[in-house]
Amino acid sequence: MSEPILATHALCKSFGALTATDDVSIDLRAGEIHAIIGPNGAGKSTLIAQICGALAPDAGTVELLGRDVTGLSTQARAQAGLARTFQISALAMEDTVLDNALLGALGAAGNPWRLWGRVSRDAALRDRAMAALDRVGLADHAGTRTADLSHGQRRQLEVAVALTLAPRAFVMDEPMAGLGAEGSRVMTGFLDGLRQEAPILLVEHDMDAVFALADRISVLVYGQVIATGTVDEIRADPAVRAAYLGEEA
Ligand SMILES: Nc1ncnc2c1ncn2[C@@H]1O[C@H](COP(=O)(O)OP(=O)(O)OP(=O)(O)O)[C@@H](O)[C@H]1O
């Protein structure tokens, strides 16, 4: 079995008397989609915040490509290859699709302070940005104002921005939220192919999408991982059915 790209080791985080993540150890391997599911308040967002560096754990570590990144900032983790989506507000809505991708490519080039005029003429950056747009199917919309994209297209643009950083792992927070049935279907197909670029740690409430996409699922209940396994294993797990899936499975 290959070494994990991303791993947490015994992550703990409490808010006062409430233990939001309790000894959470999970990993993400090359080529896979690993979904984290669980009821509201189970600790999924708290876990992701610790993985991405927005929240410091009380105990435990986060490892990216074999390196302990627990002490690194969100930005340093992103530079190290951890791509977090979806935070729609991160897009500049009045700018074009290409400009948003260029801003991402600029960050990847490690010099966000170059003058914009020079940047937009920089052929290498432009190529990197266009390649990312092409990869997500938005190359034809390069000149479109970002605000004029559909909800689903904006999510794809976020992935394009992330791709300009040549990510080694994606952490995705509810990519299906608000997309509707058709949008979810398109996004599911898109993520299905994207795991080849980098593995995806996926937090998602849409069980159809999770069951269609996940190579493995971990179930979080009251801050603890109660099971990790394939879709079939999780569907059949009595503890999971009792605690979470119920009749849905
Ligand atoms: N900053 C905070 N201060 C106090 N309590 C918090 C804080 N953030 C989260 N919590 C609590 O920690 C627990 C876990 O919350 P979290 O948002 O991680 O769960 P979740 O699984 O992401 O839920 P949802 O599916 O509803 O997004 C909840 O009981 C929540 O109220």
Image (spheres, rainbow, N blue to C red):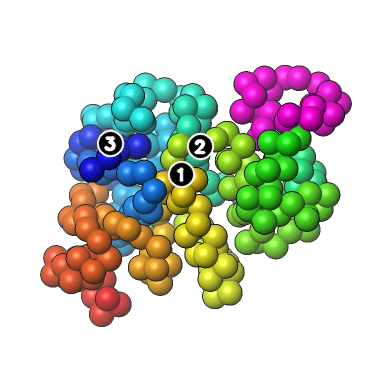
Q: Viewer-proximal residue, 147 or 65?
A: 65
Q: In this orientation, does residue 206 appear?
A: no
Q: Quadrant of the N terminus?
A: top left
The correct choice, above or below, for 73 with respect to 231 in the image is: above
State yes or no: discs 2 and 3 in contact (Cβ < 8 Å).
no
The correct choice, above or below, for 170 with respect to 38 in the image is: above
The correct choice, above or below, for 158 with respect to 118 in the image is: below
Q: Secondary structure at mark 3?
A: loop
Indicate the position of residue 115 as horizontal and vertical percent values: 81, 21
* Residue name at image x 50 percent, y 42 percent: 84
What residue type is disc 1 on?
A: Ala
Q: Which residue is mark 1?
A: 198
The majority secondary structure of the magenta stretch comes to helix
Q: Which residue is mark 3?
A: 3
Circle number at residue 167 = 2
Q: How many marks?
A: 3
- Mark 1 or mark 3: which comes first in sequence? 3
Q: Secondary structure at mark 1?
A: loop
Q: CA distance from mark 1 to mark 3?
A: 14 Å
Q: Quadrant of the C terminus?
A: bottom left
Indicate the position of residue 244 as horizontal and vertical percent values: 24, 67
